Amino acid sequence: MFGSKRSLFLEAVHAAFDRIEGSFADAEHTLVGLGDAYRRLLRDEPTVGLVMLQSYAAAADETVREAVREAVREAVRQRQLRLQ
């Protein structure tokens, strides 16, 4: 289905970042609003935070590092556009 453990892991990472983006999309576009949305997400779905932490820990693998870097870049880019 996923082909490898790495592929499965990367799908989980992308799903976690998608959940974060989804919570931000519904939030007030202020730092407080985004922070509240993130806290609610982690309270309601703690696995999202655990997957993020694991993705940072696995960043020694170049493929994982690049995937995580791109996901963070995209999240920041989306927020910068909306906060300006």
Image: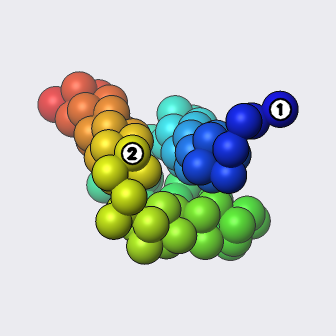
Q: Is residue 43 visible?
A: yes
Nearer to me, 51 or 35: 51
Q: Report the residue at 61% width, 71% height from top.
A: 50
How many badges with numbers are in the image? Answer: 2
Image location of residue 66, percent across then percent down: 32, 43
The vertical placement of 26 against 5, above or below, is above
Badge 1 vs badge 2, beta-carbon distance below 8 Å: no
In the visual, does 61 lie left or right of 39? Answer: left
Q: Earlier in the sequence, mark 1 or mark 2?
A: 1
Q: Report the residue at 38% width, 58% height from top.
A: 61
Residue 4: name its quadrant: top right
Q: Amino acid at mark 1?
A: Met
Image location of residue 23, percent across then percent down: 58, 44
Image location of residue 51, percent across then percent down: 60, 63
Nearer to me, 76 or 73: 73
Q: CA distance from mark 1 to mark 2?
A: 19 Å
- Return the mark for residue 63: 2
Image location of residue 19, percent across then percent down: 62, 44
Q: Report the residue at 25% width, 32% height from top.
A: 77
The vertical placement of 36 against 7, above or below, is below
Nearer to me, 53 or 67: 67
Nearer to me, 75 or 6: 6
Helix or strand or loop: what does disc 2 sit on? helix
Q: Mark 1 sits on what residue?
A: 1
Q: Is residue 72 visible?
A: no
In the visual, does 39 lie left or right of 48? Answer: left
In the visual, does 72 lie left or right of 81? Answer: right
Outermost top residue? 81
Specify few, some or many for label 2: CA neighbours under 10 Å numbering under 14, 14-19, or 20 or more: some
